[in-house]
Amino acid sequence: MKKIIYLDQNKWIELSQCFYGKSDKHRDVLGVIIEKTNSGEWIFPISIIHHIETEIREQDVQRQKLAKFMGVISKNWTIKPNLIDRNNELECNFNNKCYNPIKQDYLNVIGQNLDDVKITLNNRVLDTNIMENLKQSSLDYNVFEEFIEIQHNTGDREEQFADNEFHKETLEYFRKESEKNSDKSIEDQFIYFYMDCFKGEYSQILRKILPENQNKIAYKMYKQKLPKSFYVKMKLIFESVIKNKERKIDKNDFKDIMFLSMAIPYCDVVITERFWTGLITENGLDKMYDTVISKNIDKLIQL
């Protein structure tokens, strides 16, 4: 039976160091990972967060080695970003249809596919050789390694750092705005937060609906905990930022929440940091989606 396993970026780095002989940590589990991925039993999808975190590494050799390793293990399996496909997820979840954001197509990570006539990255059209390699092989050609170098050489790293600050400010805004409902119960605070964010994020779908009916739909989605990735995202933001007002917001919190919101409902196993592991299990998100959550990558041996 196949297992879809999502690794936090730091876990990829630790495994890479072991792979290249820089560390003996995780040697046993690395051997199992290589065996299981080669047989197709385990799938390790790459997300847009992985892409960004790898691309912005300045040290050339470290970046190139990490990208090569991640590409070898992931074999071009990717998980589509929620923001790109949120309307489709909403429709599928609402109608009890199967929604699967995970594909063995690297372009899935940027919301495109091989049927596109022109595929661009940072406004650069990929050359013919890359396109042919993409079309001919989904296994042998390390697309992740190729894309990371294209992005590193043409991308704007300052923009990525600015994005981190913007997202941190967004979380700080949520915390400040939540003070308006501080007199309400914790449950009611979450309901108001969920509904407000739902109406904002899905405004394109809701714009033709009367405001009073928008509230009814938003509340119905809250009760049904849909869409799945949106519910997880709202729960993690609420618990880590709004409810936990004393905790300092980290610049990487938003990125962590974005990948966890897709990984928890759509992967079988998620290996992440201690803080998020505790928050996820305390709020029962692991049981809700029947997902194994751990901070310990060696736990994979027990699967």
Image (cartoon, helix red, strand yellow):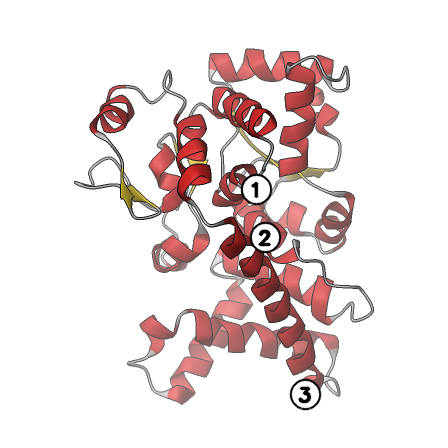
Residue 172 in view in this figure: yes
Residue 58 shown left or right of residue 151 in the figure: right
Q: Give the mark nearer the N terminus: 1 vs 3.
A: 1
Mark 3 nearby-residue class (10 Å; few <14, some 14–19, many ≥20): few
- Disc number at residue 86? none
Which quadrant would residue 272 be assigned to in this image? Answer: top right
Image location (x, y in percent) of residue 66 = 57, 26
Residue at 74 percent across and 80 percent down: it is: 185
Q: Give the mark nearer the N terminus: 1 vs 2.
A: 1
Mark 1 nearby-residue class (10 Å; few <14, some 14–19, many ≥20): some
Residue at 40 percent across and 28 percent down: it is: 146
Query: Label 1 amino acid?
Result: Glu
Say which of 269 and 8 sits in front: 8
Q: CA distance from mark 1 to mark 2?
A: 10 Å
Query: Which residue carries the number 3 mark?
Result: 180
Query: Which residue carries the number 1 mark?
Result: 53
Say which of 223 and 64 sits in front: 64
Q: CA distance from mark 2 to mark 3?
A: 26 Å
Residue at 40 percent across and 42 percent down: it is: 154
Query: Label 2 amino acid?
Result: Lys
* Circles 1 and 3: CB atoms closer than 8 Å: no
Query: Label 3 amino acid?
Result: Lys
Nearest to viewer (mark 1 / mark 2): 1
Q: Is residue 274 above or below residue 12?
A: below
SS for callout 2: helix
